[in-house]
Amino acid sequence: MIRLERRLDQPKWLSVAVPVGSLIAAFAIMAVILAVTGHAPGHTYRQMLEAGFTGNGAFSATLLSATPILFTGLAAAAAFRMQLFNIGAEGQLYLGAVGASWIALKLGDGDAGSTPLYVLAMCVAAGVMGALWALIPGVLRAFANTNEIITSLMLNYVAGFLITYLIFDSSSYWRDVSTLQAQSFPQGKPMPAGAEWPTFGSSVVVPLGFLIGLGVAASLWMLYSRTRFGFEVSVIADSPRAARYAGMRTRRKILAVMAISGGIAGIGGASQIGDFTHTLDPTGLQGAAFGYTGIVVAALARYNPFAVCLVAVLLGGLQNAGFTLQGPDFPSGLVGVMQGIILFCALGGELLIRYRVTISRRARARADTGSAAEPAR
């Protein structure tokens, strides 16, 4: 008989061995899928490794792909640490992009020396917008006990319709209507030159947004592991009843954690504007699905901020390899399938961390013929 028994004591080595084992299992399952679809697994993995990490300029492209999912992964991890399942990082990133582009356009044209001002203003505006958007499901969870999974997920679609309306269905402040071509083919206003975030390095180009993401990861680790706030969040996550008995203000913590999560995702939207698109692009944002990929990152990293950075680079490399190798003999959908397999294996690994599998033999009871009940008279 196979049973799951909850672990009273979780060995530390499991927190490393299980995620690594989950990745190995995911690649093994993907190898079977590649073989069934007519792709040699070994050759395909070598191509993906070269296209995502070791090829000329591949790692720079991987860091570009990893930057937005680093922010959404940190946003998901920040909420999941308190058993708040914020699925709305996608929409919060959209609102962050709206806020960052608005403040950049308001600041107007500037020289290269004013770029730090743009970066700071864009991050603050994007963080505030993302936090406010995340507070909607946070308030509903704290005061109406509404499932935040449903509300945050539905708000993703609302945010998508909103940014589409701003660019395609209105003459809003964000839409470029300066030329006849722009009026006929809707597009966002281009950002000022000072709002273009710098990059660092020569052989490996590192975007500023990625460095900001590393700083956010370090700050998040300090907040959760070295402060009273982080201790109370851990207690509330483990035992809400014990937290209430100890006098911890659960509602305030729910609002604070959701705001932090949404603010991090919002800064990811600012990075999209400053590092990459330099304009509010609804089609590109919605097509990339950064928020949903961030959930995979957070789950595989087991909500550890530093592990989120590593997993974000890994999945960024997979995405970059998919874009590079995409063609008639390598459908880009295979990378999406691999991400899904990684997520399922990560969730399965989480189960093994919390529970141990035991196998026991259960003897079948045999009825004693001599003790059979007499028929009723």
Image (tube, rainbow, N blue to C red):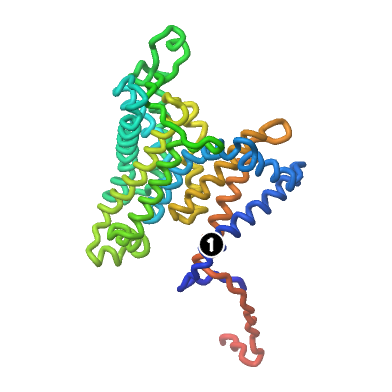
Q: Residue furthest bottom?
A: 370
Q: Residue at x 50, y 70 (%)?
A: 11
Quadrant of the rendered image containing residue 243: bottom left
Residue 65 to residue 73: above or below: above
Q: Quadrant of the N terminus?
A: bottom right
Q: Residue at x 74, y 48 (%)?
A: 42
Q: Residue at x 56, y 37 (%)?
A: 203
Residue 322 in the image: state x and y as whole percent. Answer: 63, 37
Residue 81 to residue 151: above or below: below
Q: Say what amino acid the circle numbered 1 marks.
A: Val
Residue 36 in the image: state x and y as whole percent. Answer: 75, 45
Q: Nearer the viewer, residue 117 or 251?
A: 117
Category of crowding for the residue at label 1, using alpha-carbon neighbours closer than 10 angstroms: few (below 14), some (14–19), many (at least 20): few
Q: Nearer the viewer, residue 226 or 291?
A: 226
Residue 206 to residue 314: above or below: above
Q: Residue at x 54, y 70 (%)?
A: 356
Q: Residue furthest top?
A: 180
Tell me the element at label 1: helix
Mark 1 sits on what residue?
Answer: 16
Q: Nearer the viewer, residue 303 or 244?
A: 303
Residue 363 in the image: state x and y as whole percent. Answer: 64, 82
Residue 155 in view: no
Residue 342 in the image: state x and y as whole percent. Answer: 58, 50
